[in-house]
Image (spheres, rainbow, N blue to C red):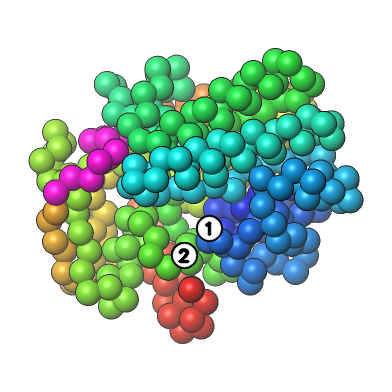
Amino acid sequence: MSVLVTGGAGYIGSHMVLELLDAGEKVVVLDNLTTGFRWAVPQAATLVVGDIGDQDLVQTVIQKYGVEAIIHFAGSVVVPDSVADPLGYYHNNTANSRTLMQVAVATGIKHFIFSSTAAVYGNPSENPVTENAVPAPMSPYGSSKLMTEIMLADTARAHPMRYVALRYFNVAGADPEGRTGQSTKGATHLIKVACETALGKRQRMDVFGTDYPTSDGTCIRDYIHVKDLARAHISALSYLRKGGVSDIFNCGYTKGYSVLEVIASVKRVSGRDFNVVLSPRRPGDPAAIVAASAKIRSTLGWAPEHDDLDKIVAQALKWEDHLARFKLAS
């Protein structure tokens, strides 16, 4: 039996594959390599190049490799892009996820873990925000993920498939052993952008919005190390295999940093100053969002091991240097 990881050649997905392999699991990756990289998939895993919207292909993969659980990462993740191209996001994130679920039900998959997002909360009235907060997404990206959560809940009520939806906060860092990291050219993740600027890969970086109702006027986010996030999926898989009921969990540290605080960390850790341009707000960005994490800690027994912003930044910088030397990004 094996675990199918959709989007397993991407940033978070490749860390998930490593975590599963380290745990002794058999892993099959399905990725169309639009934003992922063939080299990011370890030889110990099986890579199938294709799209989750291809129903016949997904069914063949599940049956051929004896898949018993699906961890679903494949999708589009850039908030401003979703505002400009909402239909593209609803197709890639929502419609394709519906196809994946349909095949999962038809082939008897019992366990399904979904890569959701804190963007479903929008601009919460209280922080830290709990899983009980009423969703109010501010972007098509957040809405597309919320729609998928709703489809999962309805599907699980109608069929013998249980799921966990993990609502990620801001994922950052790289594999501590240097095996993989955020590699997409033109990525919009704040820590990656700041690290690229510190290393001279960008001439400048923008801070979008300095008039938010926060301590320094810039947005506040909860940054979770990508390895801690991958471990949360391992905990979720174990939970489902032991008979756990379908549920939703936040993935964050219950600690927020402003954009300017993150930039200060990158400057401090890298020992380099760089050009920061203060720019207008972007549509779809909430002022502050920080995770309440009591539920995932108590129910899944998950606890962070890499909760240190400077260490997260240091690993991200190391990975950026690796990319520059080996020219892996494209």
- Which residue is under mark 1? 11
Question: Could you classify mark 2 by the number of other residues whose Cα lies within 10 Å: few (under 14), some (14-19), or many (20 or more)?
Answer: some
Please say if 76 is above or below 326: above
Horizontal arrangement in the rendering, residue 55 relative to residue 262 (left or right):
right
Question: Could you classify mark 1 by the number of other residues whose Cα lies within 10 Å: few (under 14), some (14-19), or many (20 or more)?
Answer: many
**Magenta residues, dominant SS class:** loop
Horizontal arrangement in the rendering, residue 282 relative to residue 63 (left or right):
left
Determine which quarter of the picture holds residue 267: bottom left
- Closer to the chain start, of discs 1 and 2, is 1
For the point 89% across and 51% down, the residue is 64
Horizontal arrangement in the rendering, residue 114 relative to residue 67 (left or right):
left
Please say if 176 is above or below 30: below
Residue stretch in magenta: 280-289
> Can you tell which mark lies on residue 184?
2
Secondary element type, mark 2: loop
Residue 122 location (% of width, % of height): 34, 29
